Image (cartoon, rainbow, N blue to C red):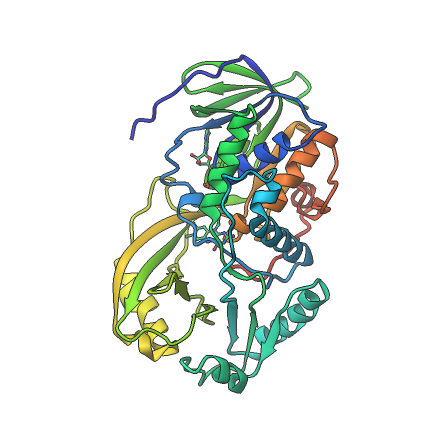
């Protein structure tokens, strides 16, 4: 595919953001919303159709069932932001009122070790204000009689601010509003960067069409391609693309109540999709980094693994019809599965917004706001996101998130 290029209007910007999908747009919008920031912002996006961006291939759910407390707090802000989108957007009447479909996530444990993780996490989540409940198989069966729970010893669910939300509408409004407030989006690709003589600053980015654009700060919001962008500044990050598959299907005998986003112990997950459909997701056991342009489906995976697992967990799913399917890429943090956020320790004006693995969409309000605070004020002012800092990678000190789907 040959992508078009455009020239930016200026040759110099205070902030250049590489990638204009949910994270680039979130950071830009929060900057535009900061009364103390009046700098110029350019977003360079190689493909404004966003056809292959993770943002377009997402499953768009949010949850508070994480093992790291700060991730619970990020999702709580996401819930607040989504439910009050219009107010956050200055009571703009054009902005729709959004709701969260609170079917919840149902984690199922088939062994003591994972059951202990769920019990421990539930205590932390509840202390942080979440509505997580730990359930015995009998209690699960009472609320959701359609599950086969023969091998299950414990479950965990939260139906408050946990489920599906319309991430694409939020993304659309961030872009629209950011543009209206003077943020410039430009179709092009960043192909190189030049650094200052002492190596402490990125001075300019070079575009595919040849222009060289000076920058005060540069933000890496390039999703699964994050490592390609950081290498332009001589920086390595442990982020790789990972292929994740989604199938939409109808059941011959639909369930009589909404299906929580059920995480089977096998890793297969399935949930309600609207009123008539269901959505299943998963990946192959062999899970290498694919080519950046490889979005081919794995039909055997569905036939031999995903569907049998699902039909065994929910026997009503033995007779189903697939109506849509797609592959997308996670920007997978191979080091500790958590985001990598904030400035680099040596190249101080190079800012990460990377490695969100499978839970980035719901982190886009909190993390975009955090990066805007770093750019405008040099510090986090609302949620302290410093645990996600790059220095943990230099120090080889993991900040593990165990609940990665
Ligand atoms: C199948 C699937 C299901 C998911 N489900 C969920 C979910 O239920 N809940 C959740 O919270 N998260 C989910 N996620 C994760 C979430 O979608 C991502 O974390 C999020 O969309 C990442 O956004 P991003 O802006 O970082 O990356 P992307 O959306 O990939 O955007 C990066 C952009 O950068 C551009 N770019 C890259 N390099 C350059 C360059 N050199 N120059 C210019 N532009 C460049 C690309 O063209 C792209 O548009 C899911 C992801 C997938 C794939």
**Residue at position x 51%, y 14% from top?**
212
x and y percent of residue 385 in the render? 69, 46
Quarter occupied by residue 117: bottom right
The quadrant of the picture occupied by the N terminus is: top left
Determine if residue 221 is in view. Answer: no
x and y percent of residue 208 in the render? 42, 20
Badge count: 0
In front here: 58 or 388? 58
x and y percent of residue 243 in the render? 39, 51
Q: Is residue 112 left or right of residue 379?
A: left
**Residue at position x 64%, y 74% from top?**
119
**Name of the residue lying farthest toward the front:** 93
Q: Is residue 376 left or right of residue 225?
A: right
x and y percent of residue 81 in the render? 60, 48
**Residue at position x 39%, y 58% from top?**
286
In this picture, is 397 found above or below 260?
above
Determine if residue 253 is in view. Answer: yes
Quarter occupied by residue 157: bottom right
In front here: 367 or 131? 131
In this picture, is 399 found above or below 249?
above
In front here: 200 or 381? 381
**Residue at position x 36%, y 55% from top?**
245
């Amino acid at each position: 595919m040959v992508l078009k290029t455009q020239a930016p209007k200026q040759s110099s910007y205070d902030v250049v953001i590489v990638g204009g999908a949910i994270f680039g747009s979130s950071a830009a919008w929060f900057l535009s919303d900061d009364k103390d920031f009046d700098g110029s912002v350019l977003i360079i996006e190689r493909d404004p159709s966003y056809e292959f961006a993770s943002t377009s291939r997402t499953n768009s759910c949010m949850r508070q069932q994480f093992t790291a407390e700060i991730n619970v707090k990020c999702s709580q802000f996401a819930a607040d932001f989504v439910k009050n989108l219009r107010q956050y957007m200055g009571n703009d009447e054009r902005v729709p009122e959004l709701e969260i479909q609170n079917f919840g996530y149902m984690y199922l444990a088939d062994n003591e070790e994972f059951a202990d993780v769920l019990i421990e996490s539930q205590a932390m989540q509840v202390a942080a204000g979440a509505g997580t409940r730990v359930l015995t198989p009998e209690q699960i069966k009472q609320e959701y009689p359609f599950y086969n729970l023969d091998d299950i010893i414990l479950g965990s669910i939260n139906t408050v601010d946990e489920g599906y939300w319309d991430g694409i509408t939020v993304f659309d409004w961030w872009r629209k509003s950011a543009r209206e407030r003077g943020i410039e989006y430009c179709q092009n690709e960043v192909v190189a960067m030049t650094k200052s003589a002492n190596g402490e600053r990125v001075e300019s980015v070079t575009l595919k069409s040849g222009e060289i654009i000076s920058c005060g700060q540069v933000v890496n919001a390039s999703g699964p391609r994050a490592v390609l962008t950081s290498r332009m500044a001589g920086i390595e990050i442990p982020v790789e693309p990972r292929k994740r598959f989604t199938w939409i299907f109808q059941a011959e005998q639909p369930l009589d109540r909404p299906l929580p986003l059920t995480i089977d112990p096998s890793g297969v997950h399935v949930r309600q999709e609207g009123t008539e459909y269901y959505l299943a997701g998963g990946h192959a056991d062999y899970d290498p980094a694919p080519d950046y342009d490889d979005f081919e489906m794995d039909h055997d995976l569905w036939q031999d693994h995903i569907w049998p697992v699902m039909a065994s967990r929910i026997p009503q799913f033995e007779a189903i019809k697939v109506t849509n399917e797609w592959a997308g890429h996670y920007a997978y943090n191979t080091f500790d599965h958590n985001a990598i956020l904030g400035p680099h320790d040596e190249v101080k004006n190079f800012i990460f917004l990377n490695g969100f693995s499978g839970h980035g969409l719901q982190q886009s309000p909190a993390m975009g706001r955090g990066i805007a605070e770093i750019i405008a004020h040099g510090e986090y002012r609302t949620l302290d996101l410093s645990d996600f800092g790059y220095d943990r990678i230099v120090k080889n000190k993991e900040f593990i998130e165990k609940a990665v789907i």
